[in-house]
Amino acid sequence: MSLDSAGSAHRRRGIPRVHISDRGRILFNKAAAQMVEGWQQVALAYDAERHRVAIQPLAEAGRNAYPFELRRTALGASIPAKKFFDHFRVSLPRDAEIGIENGCIVLQLSA
């Protein structure tokens, strides 16, 4: 099997993955970015007890909104959230499991 074939097989699996960078950007791979396609603004909420971040789509920008930016490489998407993580004193970088609850994306942060 050539390298191209192996790479294609890996992408076909389409496993949504999320990572939070040391600069506080929530990074979605291509499969995870498809879950939030069309979103422009989001509200973030943090559950310190369960180490979870909820991401809710918003119809328009508001006080608690963070811009949702597509990465220029088209390999995924990102949300700049450094101030959010600094406010809640979340240590970075972190990996996260991604899920959906009540119309929101929920990130379960790694320990």
Image (cartoon, rainbow, N blue to C red):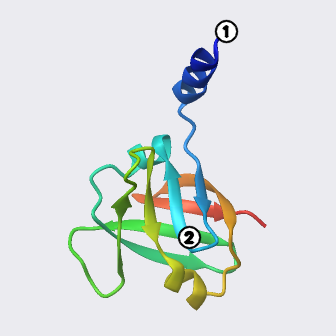
Left or right position of 107 against 72: right
Q: Mark 2: give few (<14), some (14-19) or many (20+) Cα within 10 Å.
A: many
Percent of width and height locating residue 30: 46, 42
Determine whether label 2 and label 1 are within 8 Å by CB.
no
Residue 79 appears left or right of 69: right
Q: Between residues 94 and 108, which one lies in front from this camera angle?
A: 94
Residue at horizontal 38 percent and vertical 45 percent from the top: 74
Is 98 rendered above or below residue 13?
A: below
Give residue 41's quadrant in the image.
bottom left
**Quadrant where the N terminus lies?**
top right
Q: Position of residue 59 (x, y in %)?
A: 22, 68
**Quadrant location of the C terminus in the rendered image:** bottom right
Residue at the outermost top position = 1
65 relative position to 45: left or right = left
Residue 1 got which mark? 1
Q: Label 2, on which residue?
A: 53
Amino acid, disc 1:
Met
